[in-house]
Structure formats: C-alpha cells, structure tokens
Amino acid sequence: MTKQQLFENIRKKGSFLCVGLDTDIKKIPQHLLNDEDPIFAFNKAIIDATADLCVAYKPNLAFYESLGVQGWIAFEKTVKYIKEKYPDQFIIADAKRGDIGNTSEMYARSFFDHLNIDSVTVAPYMGEDSVKPFLIYPEKWVIVLALTSNKGSKDFQFMEDVNGERLFEKVLQTTQNWATDDQMMYVVGATQGQMFEDIRKFAPHHFLLVPGVGAQGGSLEEVVKYGMNECCGLLVNSSRQIIYADSTENFAEAARKESMNLQKQMSELLKQKGLL
C-alpha cells in the first residue's frame, strides 16, 4: 500500500484509527474458549465489527507468540482473513524486530515474503544494517521506534549529547537517510503530547503510528493539534479500549461502539484541518 492509497482510505472513511489486536487468551470472553481457535474467533468478530470504522489493524506478536504454535497459527489466520475480506486495511505486524543484518533479513522474509504484511515495527538501536533488510521490499513499510509512550522512555530516548541533541532526534535524523516518507513511519506515543511539535520539526511529512490513546491516557486532540500534517500523517492505535470494552457475548458490539466514538471524533478533527 502506498502513502497516497493510505491517505485516500483515511479520507474515504473519515478515520485514521488503527485497531490493536493485542488478544490475550486470559481476557477474551469465556464462551469463546470452547471454540477450536478462540484467538482467531475473537479477532474475526472484532474485525467484522470494526472494519468500516478503521484503516489499519495492528496484531501485537507477543500475544500470539506466548501461545506457541497455536498462537502463530491464529496470527496467520487473522492476517489472511483481513487480506481476503478487507483488502483496503493496512496491516501492521507489531513485532519490534531489529538484529544483525542476516537475522533481520530472515525477519523481513517472514513478514513480507511469507505473510505479505504491509509493515513491521523495528527497533533501530543496532543501526542501519539491522533495518536495511526490511527496506528492500517495494511498497512495504518499516515503522521505526522513535519516541514511545511507556514510562521508561525517559531512560534513554531523552538523553542529550554534548550539542544538546536528544537521542530520539538523532534517530529521526539518521534514519531518514535510509528511506523516504513513502516507506518509513515512526512510532510516537500519544502520551508525549506537545512533543509532537518537536517530532514534526524533524519528520514533517512522515506518517506516525501513535499508540497510547485510551487506556494509556493519551489525548487524541493533542495528538492531532501537534502531529497532524497535510496528508493526515497519523495512524492512532487503540487496543484495550476497543477490544476489551465488554467481556460478555456482546463484546463485538461494544468494540464497534468504542470504535465508532473514536471514528466520529477523528472525522470531526479531519474536517477541522480541512482534510475532509
């Protein structure tokens, strides 16, 4: 999926919502545990209930890998289902990979060759040769961790060098030499608020994947105020607020309601910015 196609889908749906499929076997409704594949059954119901309200899905690999082979099967079935039934959806493998070149090459092969997923999150700490193998695939995206929403982000990401340049700024500047904004995005946590102004100084045209709205306390209005650009440039992820809105047999309807609330807010914010 190209950057223009993603933007067109955002305008068509009046939404820049990404639904995070952080599916925990211990949190899904009890009645699904009788299903042959409860993780996939849960995901399928969530997807069917929200697909017209969002533009992306983000399965978090940790929740699938924790279940071994069965979890990986559920992950693959989920990806296949989205691609076959909702081909306009942008699929993000939230894997946070990043290793020496030949290892990253295998990770890239897994997600882009085998699964044909649109994008994968990558940790840039090991440098250019750990990210480059993901960038040889045309129309596939690398989403680089830049400024995250967790408390520990302050441990390293705000460290300054002798010139006062912070580490996340160095990441933004350096990685832009590896690919253009047609192939690279950045993870920036919604809890960073006004810091989006600083992000946009270094990456004015890139799409940003923004976790942390909802359960983590990030403000959608702040994200848009400081982070939206001329092509929206935002994929705002919500996971727990949507998928665990209800623990009964009505969980899918509740997920749809939460998604609809966010979509309506997003549509209004897009209109205010003159993008609808």
Image: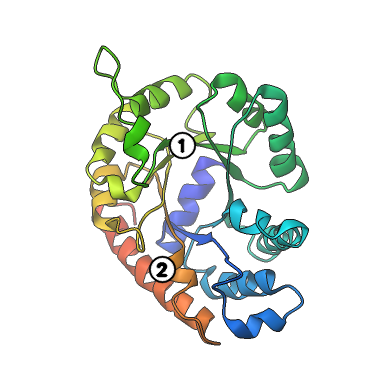
Residue found 36% across the figure and 47% down from its top: 149
User: Farthest residue toward the top?
Assistant: 162
Residue found 73% across the figure and 57% down from its top: 68
- Which quarter of the rendered picture does the C terminus lie within? bottom left
Q: In the rendered image, is residue 204 in sight?
A: no
In the displayed structure, would residue 72 be above or below residue 38? above
Residue found 31% across the figure and 25% down from its top: 159
Q: Return the residue nearer the eye: 130 or 85.
A: 130
- Position in image of residue 257 (x %, y %): 42, 78
Kindly state the secondary structure of the residue where label 1 is placed: strand
- Position in image of residue 271 (x %, y %): 28, 58
Around disc 2, counting alpha carbons within 10 Å, would you say few (fewer than 14), some (14 to 19), or many (20 or more)?
some
- Position in image of residue 26 (x %, y %): 58, 71
Q: Which mark is residue 145?
A: 1
Q: In the rendered image, is residue 68 in sight?
A: yes
Mark 1 and mark 2 lie on one chain; the one further toward the N terminus is 1
Around disc 1, counting alpha carbons within 10 Å, would you say few (fewer than 14), some (14 to 19), or many (20 or more)?
many
- Which quarter of the rendered picture does the N terminus lie within? top right
**Circle 2 is placed at which residue position?**
241
- Residue type, label 1: Leu
Residue found 60% across the figure and 58% down from its top: 63
For marks 1 and 2, give the CA distance: 22 Å
The way the protein has been coloured in the rendering is rainbow
- Position in image of residue 153 (x %, y %): 36, 39
In the displayed structure, would residue 151 be above or below residue 276? above
Kindly state the secondary structure of the residue where label 2 is placed: helix
- Residue type, label 2: Gln
